[in-house]
Image (tube, rainbow, N blue to C red):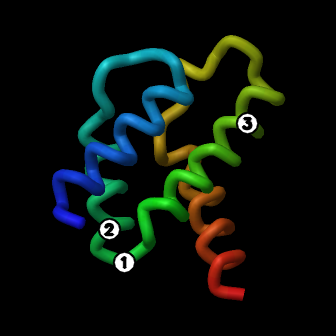
Amino acid sequence: MSNENYLVTVERFFLSLKDSGLALSATDYDLIQQWESRGIPVNIVCRGIENGVAEFDQQNTRQSSRMGLSYLKVFIEAEMERSQA
């Protein structure tokens, strides 16, 4: 998968779940590039994002627009660990 496809896949997936915004922050793009360079499969990243967004929505109703990928790092790391177990 090319760099652009990885980035676009994660970006679109996150923005669709977040249901706000048209683009990510520079920090978010940097995180995506870090995950790709670490070799974390895009499906693991997306699963972690999905888990994090669900958790965030349960705790913070109607504030998902404030959530960035940095908040979701722990969920992606957890998903990565689960996939390696």
Q: Residue at x 17, y 63 (%)?
A: 2
Q: Which residue is mark 1?
A: 39
Q: Which residue is mark 3?
A: 54
Residue 35 in percent (x, y) is at 38, 66
Callout 3, which amino acid? Ala
- Describe residue 59's horizontal placement relative to residue 23 as left or right: right
The residue nearer to you, when weighing 44 against 20, is 44
Q: Residue at x 65, y 37 (%)?
A: 53
Quarter of the image for residue 74 reads bottom right
How much space separates mark 1 and mark 2, taking CA atoms? 5 Å
Packing grade of label 3 (10 A; few <14, some 14-19, many >=20) is few
Callout 2, which amino acid? Glu
Residue 34 in percent (x, y) is at 32, 66
Q: Is residue 80 above or below residue 45?
A: below
Q: Considering the numbered disc 2 on the image, is that residue within a helix, a strand or a loop?
A: helix
Quarter of the image for residue 31 reads bottom left
Q: Which residue is mark 2?
A: 36
Q: Considering the numbered disc 1 on the image, is that residue within a helix, a strand or a loop?
A: loop
Sequence-first disc among 1 and 3:
1
**Where does the N terminus fall, quadrant-wise?**
bottom left
